[in-house]
Amino acid sequence: KAVQGEAEFLFYSEEMNQRAKEHLRIESELRSALHNNELLLYYQPKVSLRSGRIVGAEALLRWKHPVRGMVSPGVFIPVAEETGLILELGNWVLEEACRQVRAWQDENLIMTPIAVNLSARQFDARLPERMADVMQRHGVLPEQLMLEITESLLVGGADNVISIMNELVAMGLALALDDFGTGYSSLAYLKKFPISTLKIDRSFVIGLPYEENDCAIARAIVTMAQQLRQEIVAEGVETAEQMSFLRELGCDQLQGYFFSPPVPPDDFAHMLREGKRL
Ligand code: C2E
Ligand code: CA
Ligand code: CA
Ligand code: CA
């Protein structure tokens, strides 16, 4: 027994060692990625279920690694969060999104808000000032942006989170709550926060319309969001059946492979020009 335990211990520590090394590698490569133009933003359209038109997009970070090819944010965002590198990364994203919005506006293309994901670590007292600064430098209006935040930010719930949110909203920026339903916040709780949009997490969309539990959850979220007068976006919509179900529920927008995956900026601009519809 004792010997076996020891072997297990060795095994685990070797695995942890590997993971730590991998972590360090990603961290140092990510640092250089920031300075070597290896990062880019893809855009995934959000489509109105009423009009069938593109009414916005979410900017999603991509890392084009010189050797490994496209690295998924699922791999490097958690490392960036842990090391604090997410602050630099987040600033790069804001800068790039504003630059792009401005470039599209100059081509008379943009009318939709572009949503940017914010890590909880970016949510400090200086955020409103940083937002004002980046928007001003690029000549971008607050209506042209949207900020996606996650429930962990609300649940951690310091008072200053609400006041920072209020400041952002007073500046004209809209806040969307991402991955809704996966965290611990209830809708009653939500009333406290100045959030204009809820995004139903993909994990509840997957089972629609066949899984009874997912249907019940989606229905409950939509019903309550309507009471709170929040816009509701379903993410990860992949099938026509999911779309129909969500439309009947009264969901406002959908986002997902059914309409389009996240695409490079030129492809998104192309969809806008063509007036691609659902
Ligand atoms: P998220 O914010 O929930 O973004 C949605 C994710 O679902 C994206 O993955 C998107 O490509 C994927 N997705 C969209 N439609 C479908 C669909 O129909 N089916 C399936 N299976 N997946 C779909 P992605 O781009 O890999 O991003 C993963 C996560 O990384 C994001 O989840 C977000 O939490 C984080 N992330 C991405 N970009 C940023 C960023 O700029 N800043 C921060 N802080 N986090 C980011
Ligand atoms: Ca998001
Ligand atoms: Ca999401
Ligand atoms: Ca999600």
Image: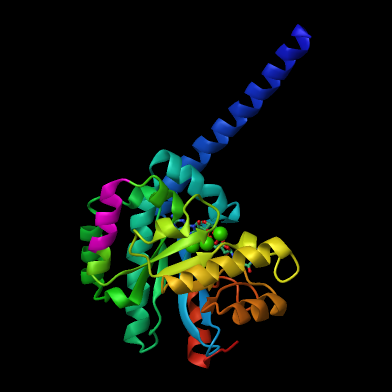
Please tell me which residue lies in front, 26 or 218: 218
What colouring style does the render use? rainbow
Q: Does the magenta segment cover residue 161?
A: yes
**Residue 66 appears in the figure:** no
Vertically, is 140 above or below 167?
Answer: below
Please tell me which residue lies in front, 226 or 81: 226
Asked whether, in this view, residue 69 is left or right of residue 180, the answer is right
Q: Residue at x 52, y 59 (%)?
A: 179
Residue 278, image x and y in percent? 60, 87
Task: Please identify the quarter of the rendering in which residue 102 is found.
Answer: bottom left
| Magenta region, main secondary structure | helix
Residue 95, image x and y in percent? 32, 64
Residue 72, image x and y in percent? 57, 55
Please tell me which residue lies in front, 76 or 164: 164
Q: Residue at x 60, y 81 (%)?
A: 247
Residue 156, image x and y in percent? 39, 44
Q: Does the magenta segment cover residue 223?
A: no
Q: Residue at x 28, y 73 (%)?
A: 142
Vertically, is 248 above or below 78?
Answer: below
The magenta region covers 158-167
